[in-house]
Image: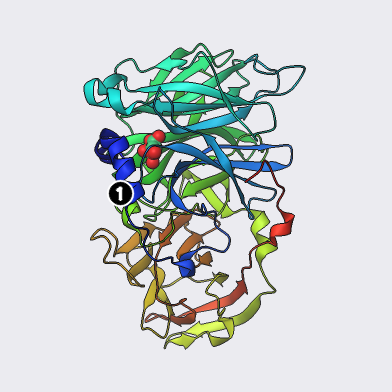
Amino acid sequence: MKKLTLLLAGLGLAAAAQAQRAPVPPATPQWRPAYHFTPAAHWMNDPNGMVFYQGAYHLFFQYYPGGMVWGPMHWGHATSPDLLSWREQPVALAPDSLGYIFSGSAVVDRNNTSGFGKNGQVPLVAIFTHHDPKREKTDPAHSQRHSLAYSLDAGQTWTKYVGNPVLKSPGIVDFRDPKVTWNEQTKKWLMTLATKDRITFYSSPNFKTWTKESEFGAQLGAHGGVWECPDLFPLVLNGKTYWVLIVNLNPGGPNGGSATQYFVGDFDGHTFKPLNNKTKWADYGPDEYAGVTFANTAPRRIFLGWMSNWEYANQVPTSPWRSAMTIPRELGLRQAGGEIYLTSTPARELTKLAAAPTTLQNVAVKAPVDLARLRVPSGKFRLDLKTSQLASFDLVLSNAAGEELVLGFDKAKNEYFIDRRKAGQTSFSPKFAGRHVAPRLATAAGADLTLFFDAASVELFADGGLTAMTEIFFPAQPLTNLRLRSAAGLTFQRVSSAALRPQPAGQVPVVGQR
Ligand code: FRU
């Protein structure tokens, strides 16, 4: 969001004041998701500081409580016992004399290496980018610095460290989004930092002093824009440990704008070495960005992204909030066609939301097949399709207003696709309408697809999560009619749908006071 940062951060408080004065458009409750996180009101972008601690998942997020467009960034906060039902909490971090609170991470400092713990209390430590909008105008190369905050009440309230900032930019304009993890190889904290066109690794024994370890990627991967919001973690495949380096990129994604690329390789505690130079994407759709993983969920690796795109995020027609997060996804590795890929699958917690499924067996598709029995009136449902012989097909979701979302597979191009050109409002941005594609990476004849539909989004997971795509859309009414068609003809051994219902709010623990 470099351009946007310059534009909005440059305007600073003037933009904030203007946004505050801007009339709030009429509310759009029809597009409020049932099971994706949204703030009750106002602007949200990246997930930040995601950490599991004492039975609660903490989601912090880039938040502007003064308006519905990007502005002076705070860390909003929400908690969940199960990754599904979220309770919004008071703002965790607000701008101060060092600037806005940009993206970053949080960890459990079990051994109190930070010294923030008192009387044996385990501190949670957050590390984030302080972005100074005033300095950005005069000395942009030194306007992003990294700072600490800690919590001694299990994430409820946060205190900024008096010695902030702890790491200053050596003269790089885009120097941000620290993701800190404990590195067992070196017994130090490791910071994976986005530094314009590469990743820079730093290490620290105590969060307060940082030593540069290495750089990665200036000549590798996709470089259509600025590298942002990285993550680094190990995953095991067939008994062997690989390291996955996530690098969000804006713009330059496979379908335009922002997107999440990743590398699979080896990390020795100091240096990352990729297995090869193939550009890979964690999600090919236009609407998953800034995705990173939770701390402290081992052995699981749980990923959440922001469900929007900087190309039009400030214009999407929802009110009084802007943007949602993706569903939680569990990451894994899988081999396909001689390559090792990251897989994303819906976190198993999501099964708790599903009503009893309705299943059709051996659905032969040639002429259009109406799946009336699978219809879910709310438009919020999970759909699973399985075929032993994949061929080109379209799945059409439509409504009485004549709107339709078409998704499916094109065998000649070996691509999955989602076409939202007629799926509702598109006029808010010329960049929004489109037919988006994703390569099929699996080589098997058969395929499985899982789709999660909410009020204004679809997330597609194909072939055990080898190909993922996320798209938002804004229909006049829910898209509840389902039709399959295939000129080539194919049979789905199984097609099933299940309504998704939000968790009863009573199950959400209260942290702090609203
Ligand atoms: C990514 C990003 C980050 C930055 C934040 C500012 O979407 O541009 O690089 O920290 O948003 O809100």
Residue for point 30% across, 67% down: 426
Asked where in the image residue 383 lies, by quadrant, the reply is bottom right
Q: Which residue is mark 1?
A: 257
Q: Amino acid at mark 1?
A: Gly
Name the spot of residue 479 as percent of width and height, x first.
Answer: 46, 77
Q: How many marks?
A: 1
Identify the image's colour scheme: rainbow, by chain, secondary structure or one colour: rainbow
**Quarter of the figure that contains the N terminus:** top left
Residue for point 59% across, 32% down: 241
Instruction: Out of 442 and 153, give the one closest to the viewer.
Output: 153
Q: Judge whether residue 392 can be spotted in this image.
A: no
Name the spot of residue 346 as percent of width and height, x first.
Answer: 58, 56
Name the spot of residue 460 as percent of width and height, x first.
Answer: 48, 61
Secondary structure beneath label 1 = loop
Q: Residue lying farthest right?
A: 120
Instruction: Tell me if residue 183 comes above or below residue 260 in the rendering.
Output: above
Instruction: Out of 480 and 313, give the one closest to the viewer.
Output: 313
Name the spot of residue 430 as percent of width and height, x first.
Answer: 23, 61
Ligand 1 is found in which quarter of the picture?
top left
Q: Please state if 2 lies on the left or on the right of 300 as rendered.
A: left
